[in-house]
Image (cartoon, rainbow, N blue to C red):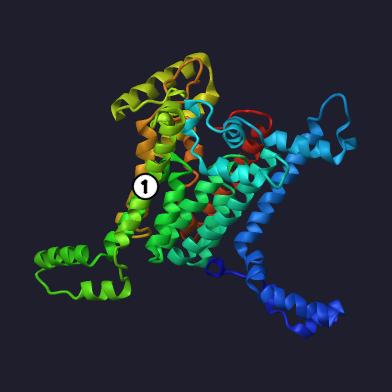
């Protein structure tokens, strides 16, 4: 945990005499100083923790307001007992996919369609529900909140390592105020995947490839997109491998016809532990373990693919996906469904220009390492490859839930955080607009409106 602490509150820097003057209790002041200097105190006083606590307070307040305005007609909301408020609070967040996660946590995989909901998040919710007397929704919320806190800490550390603390602050603010960041505080697996995926990348960048492989394996047990974590991990392994470094240096020497000592320097600065490449095998091993469980449990090792087909998702060639967009635009325009029309436009923005911008910034402007850009590109291609067929039961959004699935796309937030140093006015506009949409999306979600 100490590695995650990079920013502490200014209170620790205040002179003890000044604190004693205002508190009048030297013993209490010394205790406060010891707490502030301890790991737990520094962790709670760090910038990511303060952002998390403010975000959590925002969601709790918004939920209480929602309960107050939309209470049952048989009781005055302000006179409800605490138990009723608690039940109303958890019920307000029990929406859509959370029912499936909670069903798996409580009853297991009772049918093949539930295989699409990977097991790590329901397992954690089940473990938390045991000391909570079986309150599964509350347990799932606590798991999400703790994972969201950890993901903020790890993202800040990753951003500070790559771009400095100033950019890390702005990037974290945008992540916290992303229009779909409320999913990280809901009974969904988003916060857990955000935690382990960012943690895996940060550990890989720090040269801890076995730790990175273990976290990526947990990501594989959280979401199907966990398999894509092999890209940034393999990139880190490759750039630290003496063999690959020698090959790239020889190629460079042949092109430039000049001798180079880059290999020895790179290996000295970034040593690759013996057998570190085996850490990459933890990810497919985790997937095979889940497939074996599904085979033994319900006789279908690919039940997670059958679950995706229940949402009318099928592997589709890119040009066929373009045709689906054309059909969806035509149907939404004729029906006057402008909400679905705007949703498709936003999805196109996320899967075409933004990944191209990430690649440009990584290759041309060197603002991002290429492994992160490849991860963003692979995440986009996976979403394009499994679109939703437009129809009366699925709606007219082709890339359903793309905005939510893009939440773990950390390269995008790193680049937007850097935008503040070059175009601060544009960053502030994005932050304000993002905050407004976050408020609207959260309120609609609490109103049982589907947010993709």
- Residue 251 is situated, as x and y percent measured from the top left of the image, at 13, 63
Position of 271 relative to 179 (above/below): below
Residue 363: quarter of image: bottom left
Q: Which residue is mark 1?
A: 285
- Residue 33 is situated, as x and y percent measured from the top left of the image, at 72, 78
Of residue 180 and residue 283, the one placed in the foreground of this image is 283
- Residue 66 is situated, as x and y percent measured from the top left of the image, at 75, 35
The single residue placed furthest to the front in the displayed view is 296
Q: Residue at x 45, y 66 (%)?
A: 161
Of residue 125 and residue 423, the one placed in the foreground of this image is 125
- Relative horizontal placement of residue 370, taking residue 187 as reference (left or right): left
Q: Residue at x 53, y 65 (%)?
A: 166
Judged from the image, the secondary structure of the residue bearing numbered disc 1 is helix
Residue 220 shows in the view: yes
Residue 232: quarter of image: bottom left
Of residue 40 and residue 376, the one placed in the foreground of this image is 40
Position of 207 relative to 396 (above/below): below
Could you tell me how many numbered marks the image carries? 1
Residue 88: quarter of image: top right
Q: Residue at x 51, y 63 (%)?
A: 157
- Residue 205 is situated, as x and y percent measured from the top left of the image, at 39, 63
Name the image quarter holding the N terminus.
bottom right
Answer few, some or many: residues within 10 Å of disc 1's Cα (few below 14, many 20 plus, some between 14 and 19). few
- Relative horizontal placement of residue 278, taking residue 257 as reference (left or right): right
Q: Residue at x 69, y 45 (%)?
A: 59
- Relative horizontal placement of residue 120, taking residue 36 as reference (left or right): left
Residue 357 shows in the view: no
């Amino acid at each position: 945990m100490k590695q995650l602490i990079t920013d502490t509150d200014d209170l620790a820097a205040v002179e003890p005499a000044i604190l004693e003057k205002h508190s009048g209790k030297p013993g209490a002041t010394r205790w406060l100083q010891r707490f502030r200097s301890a790991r737990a105190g520094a962790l709670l006083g760090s910038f990511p923790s303060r952002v998390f606590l403010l975000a959590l307070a925002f969601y709790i307040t918004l939920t209480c307001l929602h309960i107050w305005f939309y209470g049952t007609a048989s009781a005055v909301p302000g006179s409800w007992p605490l138990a009723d408020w608690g039940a109303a609070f958890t019920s307000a967040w029990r929406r859509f996919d959370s029912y499936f996660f909670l069903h798996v946590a409580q009853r297991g995989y009772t049918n093949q369609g539930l295989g699409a909901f990977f097991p790590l998040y329901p397992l954690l919710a089940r473990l938390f529900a045991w000391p909570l007397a079986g309150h599964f929704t509350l347990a799932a919320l606590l798991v999400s909140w703790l994972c969201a806190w950890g993901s903020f800490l790890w993202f800040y550390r990753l951003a500070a390592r790559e771009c400095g603390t100033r950019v890390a602050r702005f990037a974290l603010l945008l992540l916290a105020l992303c229009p779909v960041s409320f999913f990280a505080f809901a009974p969904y697996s988003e916060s857990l995947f955000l935690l382990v995926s960012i943690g895996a990348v940060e550990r890989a960048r720090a040269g801890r490839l076995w730790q990175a492989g273990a976290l990526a394996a947990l990501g594989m047990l959280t979401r199907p997109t966990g398999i894509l974590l092999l890209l940034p991990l393999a990139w880190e392994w490759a750039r630290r491998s003496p063999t690959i470094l020698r090959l790239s240096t020889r190629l460079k020497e042949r092109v430039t016809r000049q001798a180079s000592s880059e290999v020895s320097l790179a290996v000295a600065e970034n040593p690759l532990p013996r057998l570190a490449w085996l850490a990459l095998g933890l990810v497919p091993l985790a997937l095979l373990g889940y497939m074996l469980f599904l085979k033994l449990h319900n006789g279908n090792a690919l039940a997670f693919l059958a679950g995706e087909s229940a949402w009318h998702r099928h592997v589709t060639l890119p040009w066929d996906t373009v045709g689906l967009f054309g059909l969806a635009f035509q149907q939404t325009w004729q029906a006057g469904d402008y909400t679905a029309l705007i949703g498709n436009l936003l999805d196109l923005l996320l899967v075409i220009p933004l990944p191209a911008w990430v690649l440009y910034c990584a290759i041309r402007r060197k603002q991002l390492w290429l492994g992160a850009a490849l991860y963003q590109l692979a995440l986009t291609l996976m979403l394009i490859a499994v679109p939703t067929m437009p129809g009366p039961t699925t709606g007219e959004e082709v890339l359903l839930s793309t905005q939510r699935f893009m939440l773990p796309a950390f390269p995008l937030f790193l680049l937007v955080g850097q935008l503040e140093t070059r175009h601060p006015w544009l960053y502030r506009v994005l932050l304000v607009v993002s905050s407004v949409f976050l408020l609207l999306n959260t309120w609609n979600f609490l109103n049982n409106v589907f947010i993709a």
